[in-house]
Amino acid sequence: MIELRPHSELGGAHHGWLDTRHHFSFAEYYDPKRMHWGNLRVWNDDTIAPHSGFPRHPHRDMEIITYVREGAITHQDSLGNKGRTEAGDVQVMSAGTGIAHSEMNLEDVPTKIFQIWIMPNEAGLPPTWGTKPFPKGERSGSFVTLASGVPGDGEVLPIRTDARMVAATLGAGESTEYHIADGRKVYMVPATGKIDVNGVVASAGDGVAISDEKLLEVSALENSEIVLVDVA
């Protein structure tokens, strides 16, 4: 089953400094049919105005992945971590027993991010944070794993949940595949461009919720950047 969730039909809000779209119920947006997808709980599409952002606030017991699409985000947290994550790169925060953090756009241009929350396998673990550059050239033409808690996925950003996040950049006319293990679900969003997924066409910002499929054949109808989360 492949369900297209058009960007124009997502929940969301305009806060002046923040333009946000919610693929799942979040904040004031509530849809009982879109509470989660497997253990994927949140996928927010955020555009943050220059010199603004999310001031310090707490989280606990959630795996939070930030995929920067344009611009950069600057992180600070109660553990003393500081870091700037640029477009194409990824940061991961395991909230565990509790962590407070800020995510600010200190740039002179808007920053666009995907904010992805996945429920952890185990509650009450110590909080952690990490970031890693992932040059887009390394994922040209095929999916590359960026963050994972699945055994055997290699030297990627670790998350403490049975899930992985992968990304690919495809030129117009290029195709690639993604194999799905039994019993798992996939949620895919083209960050840019337009793609065909097993005959379903999705444009930038659209969500594609996938279950009971073994193989995804993904073709780029335009130059496209694709982010995919594979969950239990």
Image (cartoon, helix red, strand yellow):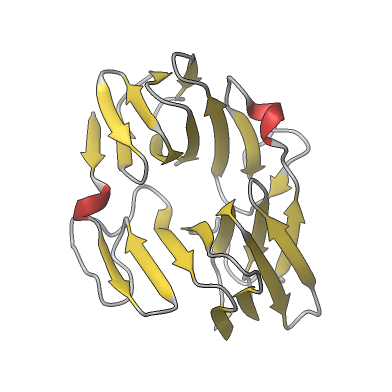
Q: Which residue is drawn at 65% across and 40% down?
A: 146
Depth check: 98 or 122 in front? Answer: 98
Q: How many marks?
A: 0
- From the viewer's perspective, tell me whether residue 204 is left or right of residue 176: left
Depth check: 1 or 196 in front? Answer: 196
Estimate the x, y position of residue 99 in percent, counting from the top left.
Answer: 65, 79
Image quadrant in which you'd find residue 104: bottom right
Q: Residue at x 71, y 28 (%)?
A: 138
Estimate the x, y position of residue 142 in percent, counting from the top left.
Answer: 58, 21
Estimate the x, y position of residue 224 in percent, counting from the top left.
Answer: 47, 31
Image quadrant in which you'd find residue 218: top left
Q: Is residue 142 above or below residue 209?
A: above
- From the viewer's perspective, tell me whether residue 77 is left or right of residue 166: right
Estimate the x, y position of residue 26 in percent, counting from the top left.
Answer: 33, 69
Q: Residue at x 57, y 67 (%)?
A: 123
- From the viewer's perspective, tell me whether residue 36 is left or right of residue 64: left
Q: Which residue is drawn at 64% across and 79% down?
A: 101
Image quadrant in which you'd find residue 192: top left
Report the quarter where the N terminus lies.
Answer: top left
Report the quarter where the C terminus lies.
Answer: top left
Q: Is residue 92 above or below residue 140?
A: below
